[in-house]
C-alpha cells in the first residue's frame, strides 16, 4: 500500500496526485485505436450520455486524422478532454464495450478521447465556424459544465452569450470538485481557454446572481436565460457538534485542496461520513495528502453505498478503511473535534434502524461530512413561476429543457439533482437547442 | 520422434527450413549464425557481377498495430566481390558439412554462367539456384524476372548451366506472370532439377502524402519494388499448388513466400513444396524464429502420425479442384452461438451491406443478432468478420447424399444459359425493395 507523507513541495503534490489516466503518446493511441472493432450501433455510444460517435473518432485516430477525431468528440461534447479524464468510464462507455463480454480489457475510450482533444487543444486548432450573429442575446447563469456547454452551442448557432459566474474561474466543479488525480487544474483551464477562444462567449466572473433585481435585469436584457447553477454547499447533519472546528463539508474541503493543496491543513486522523463518490474522493484525497488514518463511515452496508465500486477500490488502495452500518449520533469535542459517537445500524425492510446499546466512540481530529449537497432553492424561489420538485430539482420539459417559466431553461446538477460532468455537458447542449427552437 | 530431414532433388538438409537468397544470407557470418541457430540450409545472396545499391531500399505495409505485414525492396543482387563470397562459402561448409548451402546466381552470357557455376561448385556449394525472379532493377538489364517471363530464354539459360553443373540446379521463378506453370514447364523441359517460388511481386507499397513520392524514397524519387512478407503467402500458395498439380512440372518444388512460422511452412508443404525458404520473417525477427518452427513442425507431425516429410508433402493437392468440380448441392448456413456472442453486430452490418441481408437485429435488448436461414447463402462472411473465435459456425444443412457439380449441371442442362434464365441460382432469393434502404 502506498505511503503518502504530508506534502511540502510541488513534487510531493505531483506524486500524491499522480494522474490515473495520463495522456497517451501517439504510439499508444495508435495501438489502442487499432483494437477497436468499429461495432455496428455501438453499445459504447449508447452508454455515453453525450452519444459521442466513439468508433468513428477511434478510427480517425487510427488513420492519423487527429483533428477529425477531436471534431467528432466536440460535436457531441464540449468537455471532450475533461470528460475523457473524469468520466466514470467503467460504468459508461468502457463498461459497455463489447470486449467486456469476452473478459478482454475494454478499449480505453476515455484516454483516447483525451489524447485526441488535448493534441488539438495544444495546437489551439480551430475546428468550428460560427453562424452569423442572429442578434439575439442569451444569459447563462453559472460557468460550470452545463453553462459553458450551453454557451458554446449557442455561439455556434449565432447567439450573443454572456455568462454570469459567481466564482473566479469557469468550469464549475470540474475545477473545484473533480479529484486532482483524475484531472489537473491546468488541463481544465486549458480546455476552458480553448473553448473561449473558439466560441467567443463572455464570462463575467465574480458576478453572483442572487437577488430579484439582478434576475429582473437579466430578464429585461436577454431573450432567454439558462440556469446552470449546480448545487449548493454540503447539507449539515442535525446532530450535536456539527459546528465544532475541524468538522467540515466535503465539497468545501475538496475545493480548498483543489485550489491550494499544499496549504490545506489535513488532520492526522480523519473520519469521513457518507457513502457516495464525494465521500470516496474526500477520503482518498486526505490519505494522499498524508493523513495517517482515514475511516469512511457509512450508515448502511457496503453493498448499498452510492459510490461506484471502483471509487471505493481507489480509496482502499491508498489506505482508507471502510466502516459500515454505523450512524453518527454526535460529534464530540469542546472547540476542536475529538471524536465521533456512533451507533451500529441494521437495515430492516429497506429502513435503517439503530441497534440499541451498540454505541461506541471513535477518536479523530477531523470530521468530513459528505452527506450530499443542498439545492439552491433560495435563488430558484426568486424566479417567477419556476417550478422545482420537493428535492429542489428544477422541473423541465424533457426535450427542450425549458422550465415552467418559458424564459428560463435549465440543465446540469441543478436540474438532474447531481450527476456527472458528462451529463451536465449533454444537458447544456440540449438546452441550447431548446432555446434555439423556442426563439427561432 | 518424426524425421524432419529434407531432400530437395538430392540436396539434403537436417530440416526443411532454409533461408532464401536475400540480405540474411549476404555473408558467411550470417549463414553460420543461422545454422548455429538451427536453420537447415541457406541460399546465398545472389552472386554475379557485384552491383551498387541505393540508400533507402525497403518499405513496408503496416496493418493497424502490426508492422511489416507486407514488405517491399528495391535492392539488387550482391554488392560484394565474388571472391569474398566464395571464400566464405568454403568456410561455412567446413563448419557445417551437413547443412545445405546453395549458391544463387545471376549473370548474362553463356561464358559467365559457365564460369560462375564452376566457381560456386568449387567453393563447395551443394546446389545452384538460378535467379530468374528479381522484378526490379536487374530486369531492366535483361536479367532476373526478364528471364523468368520469357520461357524460351529461361530454357536456354538452364541448358547453359546444365552443360557444366554437377550439382542440382534449382530455377527460381517470378510470380510476375499470368500463368506460373509456363516458366515452370520450361524449367523442367530445360532439365532443371527443381524449381523454387515465389520471388517478389512488383509493387508500390505506398505514397508519401506530403511529398507525393512512393516509398522507399531515394532522393525524392522512387521505383517499383518487390513485394513479400506475410501478405503474399496466399499468392505463393496458389502458385506452388499450380506447379505441383501440373503434369509438365514433375520436378520438386521449394516453397517461398510469406512463411514465418511452422504453420506457414506446413501449408506450403501440404500444397506440394519439398522444403521452404524464408526471407522477410528472418529480416523482421532474426534467426531465432527457427526455434519455434522446428518443434512446431515436429509436434504437428507427431500429432498427425507422420514419420517423415514425404508423408505430408502434397497431401492437400487432391483437395484442390477446379471450380466446376465443386459440389453445388453442399449447403451450409451460419449459426450464432449466443453464449459466445459479444454483441458487436459486425456480422449484421457485414451481411446487410456486404452480403445477402440474412442477419436480423434482435428485437429484444440482447444485441445478439439472428440468422435468417432462408436468406443465408452460406458465404462465410459473417463468420469471418466475427471477432469471437468459433462464435459463428457454418452448419451443414444438406443431407450429404447429393453431389452435383457445375460440370454436371452443364451436362444435364440444369445450368442457366440466358440472361433471365429461370435456372439462375439467385432466382427467387429474397432481397428487400431498393427504397427500403432509405427508411430509417
Ligand atoms: C467532489 C466532487 C467530485 C466530483 N467528481 C466527478 C468526477 O470525477 N467525474 C464527473 O464526471 N463528475 C464529478 N463530479 C460531478 C460534477 O462535477 C458535476 O456533476 C458537474 O460539475 C455539474 O455541472 P453543472 O454545470 O451543473 O454545475 P457546477 O459544476 O456546480 O457549476 C455551477 C457553476 O455555477 C456557479 N453558480 C452557482 N450559483 C450561481 C449564481 N447564483 N450566480 C452565478 N453563478 C453561480 C458556480 O460557481 C459554478 O461555477 C464531482 C462532484 C463533486 C462535488
Ligand atoms: C467476393 C469478391 C467478388 C469479386 N467479384 C468481382 C467481380 O465480379 N468483378 C470484378 O471486376 N472484380 C471482382 N472482385 C475484385 C474486386 O473488385 C477488387 O478488384 C479486388 O478485391 C481488390 O480490391 P481490394 O483489395 O480492395 O479487395 C471481387 C472481389 C471480391 C472480394
Ligand atoms: S464523454 Fe465520457 S462517457 Fe462519453 S465517451 Fe467520453 S469518456 Fe466515455
Ligand atoms: S464497443 Fe468497444 S470495440 Fe465496439 S466500437 Fe465501442 S469501443 Fe470499439
Ligand atoms: S459478429 Fe459475432 S460477436 Fe459480433 S454480433 Fe455477430 S455473432 Fe455476435
Image (tube, coloured by chain):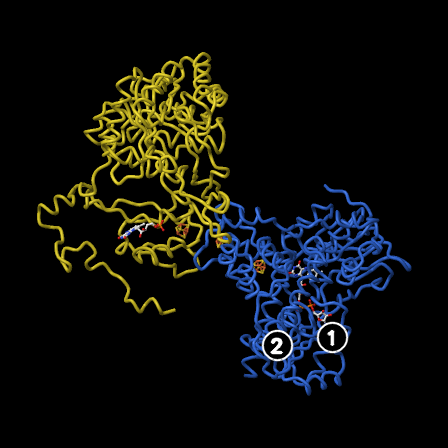
Residue farthest toward the bottom in the current orientation of the protein = A220
Hue used for the chain lettered A? blue
Locate residue A435, reporting x and y percent: 58, 79
Front residue of B370 and B429: B429
Whether residue B307 can be seen here = no
Where disc 1 sits, the SS reads strand
Left/right placement of residue A351 relative to residue B438 reads: right
- Compute the Cα span from label 1 to label 2: 27 Å
Q: Is residue B141 above or below residue B213?
A: above
Q: Residues within 10 Å of mark 1 (few under 14, many from 20)?
A: some
What residue is shown at x 80% (from left), y 55% (from top)? Answer: A261
**What subunit carries mark 1?**
A
**What subunit carries mark 2?**
A
Whether residue B311 can be seen here = yes
1 and 2 marks in contact (CB < 8 Å): no
Chain identity for the colour yellow used in the image: B
Tell whether circle 2 marks a residue whose Cβ is less than 8 angstroms from ligand 1.
Answer: no
Residue farthest toward the left in the current orientation of the protein = B412
Front residue of A420 and B296: B296
Left/right placement of residue B283 relative to residue A382 reads: left
Left/right placement of residue B269 relative to residue B426 reads: right
Quarter of the C terminus of chain A within the rendering? bottom right
Front residue of B242 and B330: B242
Instruction: Please check whether the numbered discs 1 and 2 fall on a single chain.
Output: yes
**Number of marks present in the image shown:** 2
Disc 2 designates what residue?
Answer: A395
Disc 1 designates what residue?
Answer: A204
Q: Quadrant of residue A341?
A: bottom right
Locate residue A210, reporting x and y percent: 76, 79
Locate residue A409, reporting x and y percent: 62, 78
Q: Is residue A228 above or below residue A4?
A: below
Amino acid at each position: 500500500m502506498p505511503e503518502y507523507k504530508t506534502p511540502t513541495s510541488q513534487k510531493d503534490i505531483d506524486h500524491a496526485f499522480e494522474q490515473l489516466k495520463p495522456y497517451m503518446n501517439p504510439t499508444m493511441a495508435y495501438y489502442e485505436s487499432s483494437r477497436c472493432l468499429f461495432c455496428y450501433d455501438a453499445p459504447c455510444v449508447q452508454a455515453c450520455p453525450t452519444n459521442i460517435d466513439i468508433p468513428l473518432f477511434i478510427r480517425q485516430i487510427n488513420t492519423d486524422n487527429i483533428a477529425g477525431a477531436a471534431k467528432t468528440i466536440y460535436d457531441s461534447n464540449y468537455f471532450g478532454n475533461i470528460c475523457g479524464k473524469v468520466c466514470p468510464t467503467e460504468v459508461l462507455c468502457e463498461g459497455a464495450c463489447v470486449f467486456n463480454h469476452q473478459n478482454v480489457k475494454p478499449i480505453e475510450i476515455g484516454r483516447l478521447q483525451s489524447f485526441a482533444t488535448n493534441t488539438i487543444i495544444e495546437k489551439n486548432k480551430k475546428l468550428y465556424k460560427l453562424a452569423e450573429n442572429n442578434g439575439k442575446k442569451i444569459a447563462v447563469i453559472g460557468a460550470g459544465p452545463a453553462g459553458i456547454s450551453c454557451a458554446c452551442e449557442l455561439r455556434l448557432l449565432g447567439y450573443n452569450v454572456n455568462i454570469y459566474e459567481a466564482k473566479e474561474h469557469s468550469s464549475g466543479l470540474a475545477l473545484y470538485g473533480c479529484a486532482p488525480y483524475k484531472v489537473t487544474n491546468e488541463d481544465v483551464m486549458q480546455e476552458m481557454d480553448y473553448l473561449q477562444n473558439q466560441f467567443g462567449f463572455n464570462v463575467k466572473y465574480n458576478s453572483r446572481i442572487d437577488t430579484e433585481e439582478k434576475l429582473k435585469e437579466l430578464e429585461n436584457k436577454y431573450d432567454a436565460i439558462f440556469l446552470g447553477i449546480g448545487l449548493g454547499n454540503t447539507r449539515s447533519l442535525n446532530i450535536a457538534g456539527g459546528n465544532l472546528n475541524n468538522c467540515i463539508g466535503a465539497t468545501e474541503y475538496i475545493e480548498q485542496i483543489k485550489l491550494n493543496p499544499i496549504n490545506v491543513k489535513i488532520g492526522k486522523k480523519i473520519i469521513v461520513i457518507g457513502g457516495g463518490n464525494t465521500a470516496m474522493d474526500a477520503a482518498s484525497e486526505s490519505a494522499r495528502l498524508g493523513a495517517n488514518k482515514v475511516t469512511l463511515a457509512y450508515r448502511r452496508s457496503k453493498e448499498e453505498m452510492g459510490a461506484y465500486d471502483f471509487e471505493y477500490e481507489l480509496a482502499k488502495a491508498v489506505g482508507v478503511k471502510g466502516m459500515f452500518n454505523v450512524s453518527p449520533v454526535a460529534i464530540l469535542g469542546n472547540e476542536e473535534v475529538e471524536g465521533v459517537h456512533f451507533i451500529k445500524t441494521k437495515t430492516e425492510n429497506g429502513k435503517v434502524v439503530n441497534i440499541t446499546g451498540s454505541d461506541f466512540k471513535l477518536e479523530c481530529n477531523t470530521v468530513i461530512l459528505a452527506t450530499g449537497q443542498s439545492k439552491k432553492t433560495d435563488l430558484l424561489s426568486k424566479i417567477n413561476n419556476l417550478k422545482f420538485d420537493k428535492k429542489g430539482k428544477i422541473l423541465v420539459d424533457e426535450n427542450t429543457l425549458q422550465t415552467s417559466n418559458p424564459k428560463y431553461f435549465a440543465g446540469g446538477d441543478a436540474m438532474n439533482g447531481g450527476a456527472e460532468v458528462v451529463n451536465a455537458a449533454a444537458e447544456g447542449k440540449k438546452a441550447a437547442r431548446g432555446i434555439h427552437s423556442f426563439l427561432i | 520422434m518424426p524425421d524432419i530431414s529434407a531432400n530437395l532433388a538430392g540436396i539434403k538438409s537436417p530440416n526443411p527450413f532454409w533461408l532464401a537468397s536475400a540480405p540474411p544470407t549476404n555473408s558467411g557470418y550470417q549463414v553460420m549464425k543461422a545454422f548455429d541457430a538451427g536453420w537447415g540450409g541457406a541460399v546465398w545472396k545472389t552472386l554475379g557481377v557485384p552491383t551498387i545499391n541505393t540508400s533507402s531500399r525497403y518499405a513496408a505495409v503496416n496493418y493497424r498495430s502490426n508492422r511489416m505485414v507486407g514488405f517491399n525492396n528495391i535492392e539488387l543482387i550482391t554488392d560484394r566481390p565474388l571472391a569474398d563470397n566464395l571464400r566464405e562459402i568454403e568456410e561455412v561448409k567446413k563448419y557445417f558439412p551437413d547443412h545445405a548451402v546453395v549458391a544463387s546466381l545471376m549473370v548474362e552470357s553463356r561464358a559467365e554462367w559457365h564460369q560462375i557455376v564452376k566457381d560456386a561448385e568449387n567453393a563447395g556449394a551443394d546446389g545452384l539456384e538460378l535467379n530468374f525472379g528479381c522484378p526490379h532493377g536487374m530486369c531492366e538489364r535483361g536479367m532476373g524476372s526478364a528471364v523468368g517471363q520469357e520461357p524460351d530464354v529461361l530454357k536456354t539459360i538452364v541448358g547453359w548451366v546444365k552443360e557444366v553443373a554437377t550439382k542440382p540446379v534449382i530455377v527460381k521463378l517470378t510470380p510476375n506472370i499470368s500463368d506460373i506453370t509456363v516458366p515452370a514447364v520450361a524449367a523442367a523441359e530445360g532439365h532443371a532439377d527443381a524449381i523454387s517460388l515465389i520471388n517478389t511481386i512488383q509493387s508500390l507499397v505506398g505514397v508519401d502524402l506530403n511529398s507525393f513520392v512512393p516509398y522507399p524514397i531515394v532522393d525524392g524519387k522512387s521505383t517499383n519494388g518487390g513485394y513479400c512478407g506475410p501478405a503474399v503467402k496466399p499468392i505463393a500458395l496458389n502458385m506452388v499448388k499450380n506447379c505441383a498439380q501440373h503434369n509438365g512440372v514433375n520436378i520438386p518444388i521449394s516453397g517461398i513466400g510469406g512463411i514465418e512460422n511452422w504453420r506457414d511452412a506446413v501449408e506450403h508443404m501440404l500444397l506440394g513444396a519439398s522444403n521452404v525458404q524464408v526471407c522477410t520473417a528472418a529480416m523482421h525477427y532474426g534467426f531465432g524464429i527457427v526455434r519455434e518452427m522446428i518443434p512446431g513442425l515436429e509436434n504437428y507431425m507427431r500429432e498427425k502420425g507422420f514419420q517423415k516429410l514425404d508423408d505430408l508433402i502434397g497431401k492437400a493437392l487432391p483437395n484442390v479442384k477446379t471450380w466446376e468440380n465443386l459440389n453445388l448441392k453442399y449447403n451450409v448456413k451460419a449459426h450464432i452461438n449466443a453464449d459466445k456472442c459479444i454483441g458487436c453486430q459486425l456480422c449484421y452490418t457485414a451481411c446487410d451491406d456486404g452480403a445477402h441481408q440474412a442477419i436480423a437485429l434482435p428485437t429484444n435488448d440482447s444485441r445478439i443478432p439472428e440468422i435468417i436461414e432462408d436468406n443465408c447463402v452460406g458465404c462465410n462472411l459473417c463468420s469471418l468478420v466475427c471477432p469471437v473465435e468459433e462464435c459463428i459456425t457454418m452448419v451443414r444443412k444438406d443431407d450429404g447424399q447429393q453431389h452435383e457439380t457445375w460440370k454436371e449441371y452443364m451436362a444435364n442442362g440444369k445450368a442457366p444459359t440466358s440472361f433471365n434464365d429461370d435456372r439462375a441460382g439467385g432466382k427467387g432469393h429474397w432481397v428487400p425493395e431498393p427504397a427500403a434502404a432509405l427508411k430509417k
